[in-house]
Image (cartoon, rainbow, N blue to C red):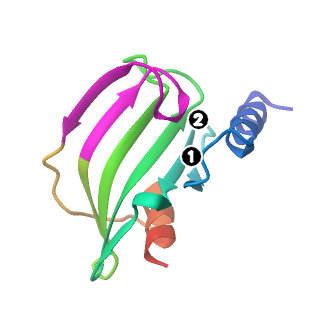
Amino acid sequence: MTARLIKIFVLSFIFSSCCYANNWKSVANSADGESMYFVDIEFLQKSGNTRTFWLLENKSKRDKFGALSTKENLSVNCVAKDIKQIYLSSFDDLGGNGKVISSFPVKGDWVPIAPGSINAYIYKFVCK
């Protein structure tokens, strides 16, 4: 097996185990196999054409700040196909656990969702 396939297998095993919260649903994996993305369906809010939710990213290795995971609060406009970041936190352990490395509100603008991107997979999941 290649190293990439091993990483994907290990991350998939971790998050399919009985101990991982049922409210986090897998929505995408990065093309390079370095990240897995999950939406918290317990906090998925629908208001008209907008969906607001928490997204968890688990990384196979630490980023340059030492984070293994991030949680983002995002909004998606299902008609306009736009996405906006609201809040971002990073953690030194998987699953949004461990020490908080950073946490702050984001004053992001609505941006178009590019076809084939991670955001496109997220859009399909939250707007279905």
Q: Please give the name of the residue rendered at 53% of the width and 36% of the height, measured from the top-left corner.
A: 58
> Is 61 left, or right, of 92 in this rendering?
right
Q: Residue 34, how many percent across, how many down?
A: 58, 35
- Dots 1, 2 in contact, CB < 8 A: yes
In the displayed structure, would residue 115 be above or below residue 30?
A: below
Distance from Cα at disc 1 to Cα at disc 2: 6 Å
Q: Which region shows up in magenta?
A: 87-105
What's the residue type where badge 2 is placed? Answer: Glu
Q: Please give the name of the residue rendered at 41% of the width and 26% of the height, measured from the top-left corner.
A: 91
Residue at the right extreme of this rendering: 1
Neighbours of disc 2 within 10 Å: few (<14), some (14-19), many (20+) = some
What's the residue type where badge 1 is placed? Answer: Ser
Q: Quadrant of residue 4?
A: top right
Residue picked out by circle 2: 34
Q: Please give the name of the residue rendered at 78% of the width and 32% of the height, measured from the top-left corner.
A: 6
Q: Quadrant of residue 102?
A: top left
Secondary structure under tag 1 reads loop
Residue picked out by circle 1: 30
